[in-house]
Structure formats: structure tokens, C-alpha cells
Amino acid sequence: MLSSRTVPLGQRTPILEPEEYADRFSSTVTNGFIALEIAIGNKLGLFGSLNEFTSPVTSTELAVSCKLKERYVREWLGCMSAAGFVSITPDDKYFIPEACKPHTESSKLASALPHVAANTSSVLECFKEDGPKGYDYSNQLETLMWLDLDNKLCDSKWIDKNLFPVGHKEKDTISNVLDFGCGPGSLTIKLAEHLPNAKVYGVDIDRNAIEKAKENKAKENIPNVEFVLLENEHLDESWTKKFDWITMVDVLHDLPNPNLSISEIKRVLKDDGIVSAIDPCVDSDHKMNQGNLTAAMLYVFSTFICLPCSMSREPAVANGIGWGVQNRAEFLKSKGLKILGDEHKGLLQFQKA
Ligand SMILES: C[S@@+](CC[C@H](N)C(=O)[O-])C[C@H]1O[C@@H](n2cnc3c(N)ncnc32)[C@H](O)[C@@H]1O
């Protein structure tokens, strides 16, 4: 998930000298283009296939293994070898050195680029003084599906380590779980598998996401999970004090009306219930993010996806990822919530104060 791209805060670097500035600027632009080719390699399985070959292959052998046209694959290989990510033998065969293969894993992140970039014309309009305020996820199912890919990999061990309120809740005391802003629902389904004696609800404001989630549920055949479309931002009236545990993964900073959503979440949370929110970490103070390239990358997601979502409907609070960890903590406290543990971490656990 996006929030796992978090780096420790406060790693501010000094202002760049002009020469370094020039180098960083031009290499960033160059690398941006190369990253798009990396995205293609990930999506078409070219890295996966090259990693599986145990000896160098021709462009034709690689193309055949991925069911692709050789001419295009050869162009891709030209780019990747020029960039240094694919090596070539004297007889023109291609390979990735064994020790380098695991590092092609980063191509997964690059594969988000086409989805992010698909919003370019919309976000350009939003920037304009007289343009629209924002847009939600209704035209971004592919982005949601991309985010959901990581969720499919979350097993029980991951949930215990990264999401479950260990030390605050025992698994067997949990009867009802709410995954708020569940997207296409893979994590919700994993939560239901993790807690087979609980009933797990996934809610989202996006119709396409809930339809996908229902399809996923049908495929997985998990009985204790249910997906509900939020027609407005209000949760079911009958859910007051129903939930022992509420999860919000990559949602909090997206909310256009966090006041209302958090009030609703408080209403449906049991008095001893816990909320586990995973949210990206950047500092609320721009100065403290200087030189933090992971923060810079998160801001790209925010500009193209999160900020427009947080501005997509009134009161359009416009949080986005730039809201930052300090503002986020202040907001939650102002809503009568008590943060358990470190409020600067990607995982925030909180309960009613
Ligand atoms: C970045 S996605 C995260 C989806 C999922 N939790 C995951 O980890 O893949 C944010 C989700 O929050 C949903 N969302 C945004 N505003 C919402 C609101 N007011 N109420 C419920 N869901 C909302 C979006 O529709 C979207 O599916």
C-alpha cells in the first residue's frame, strides 16, 4: 500500500548548490521517462520473465515468453539496457544479473505511473482558478485496482504486524469489524479470513469499488464479509456502537469531510473500540520535507489523486497527503480521540478519549 512508502521524518537536507540542483533536476526528468518504460516492463511481465530465465535470451525468446511483438520488446530492451537495468552478452542476448533480479521489484511502484498520469488533464483543470475543485475515484478504478494489488498479499502475519491493535485488543473479543473506504475490498476479505468468528463490513463511497469488492467476495467465497455502498457520507443508522475494530487504509487524508466521517466513525465505534488508520507520513511543515524524495513522490500521488479527492465534494477540506502527520494528530485530538502510541507513524491507532 501507498503508506508503506513512508520514510522517517525530519531527514531534511540543506538547500542544493546550483551544480547539484542542475544535476538533480535533469536526472529527475530523464528518470521520469525511463520510469514509464519500467512501468511497461512490469505490466507486460517482461521483468518477471527475464527474472525467470536462468541464461541470457534473445529479444525473440523474451517476446515469445510474454506473448508480445518482438519489435516492441526489442525497443524496450534498448531502453532498459541503455539505462543499465538489462545487460547484454557479446552475441546480443539479454539478461538481468542474478544478484540484481530482486531489485526489479521496484517496477511495481513504477506501474502506478500510467494510472496517475491518466489524471493529468483533469488535474490541470483543477489547478486553474476557474477550474473544478477536484474529482473523486469514480473514474479511477484502475488506480484503486493497483492499490488493491498489495492488499491481496496481506496475510494474517502482515495484519498482526502492521494493522491489528496488538496489546489493545484480543482477537477473540472482536465481533464486528468495519473497513472504512475499503476500495475493491481485498484487504477487507483478508480481515474476514483473519477473524473468522467476526463479521467484517467494507464500506466505500465509490460505486465501482464496491461492485468490484462484491465480485471479489463471490470469487473468494468468504461468508463473514459484506460490502456496503455509502450513498452519502453517513454510516448505517443501526450501526451505533456496533464495531470493536475499524480500519482505514489510505483513506483519512482523502476525505472531503473528515469532520463528518470521523463523527460517524466515532458513533459506530464501541466505547472500547479501536480504530487503526494507515496513512502516508509527510511532515506538515514543507521545510521539514526538504530533500526527502519519498515525500516528494508521495506528493505526486497526492496532487493527482488524494488532494482532488479531498476537494471532490463540500466542504472540500483539501487535506491530501500534504496534510501531514502533525495536522492529522491535532485534528484527531480535536475530535475527542486519543492516539495510542506514536502519532508520527504510518499506523495510527486511536480510540475515544
Ligand atoms: C486510496 S483508496 C484506498 C482503498 C483501500 N482502503 C486500499 O487500501 O486499497 C481511498 C478509498 O477511500 C474511499 N473514500 C473516499 N472518500 C470517502 C468517504 N467520504 N467515505 C468512504 N469512503 C471514501 C475512496 O472511494 C477510495 O476507495
Image (spheres, grey):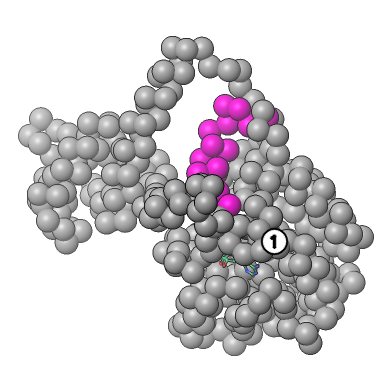
Residue 105 rendering spot, x and y as whole percentages: 41, 47
| Quadrant in which ligand 1 is drawn | bottom right
By secondary structure, the bulk of the magenta-drawn segment is best described as: helix
Name the residue carrying label 1: 315
Badge 1 element: loop
What residue is drawn where x is 58% and y is 62%? 312
Coordinates of residue 296 in the picture (x, y in percent): 54, 37
When asked about the image quadrant of residue 34, the answer is top left
Q: Nearer the viewer, residue 289 or 103?
A: 289
Query: Across the whole image, how many numbered discs are drawn on residues?
Result: 1
> Is 118 situated left or right of 232 in this image?
left
Q: Is residue 36 left or right of residue 345?
A: left
Up the image or down, 325 lies above or below 311; here it is above
Q: Residue drawn 73% across and 83% down?
A: 236
Residue at (64, 25) in percent of width and height: 12
Does residue 320 show up magenta in the picture?
A: no
The magenta stretch is 288-307
- Residue visible at 60% across and 43% down in the picture: 6
Is 298 colored magenta in this rendering?
A: yes
| Left-right relation of 214 to 201 | left
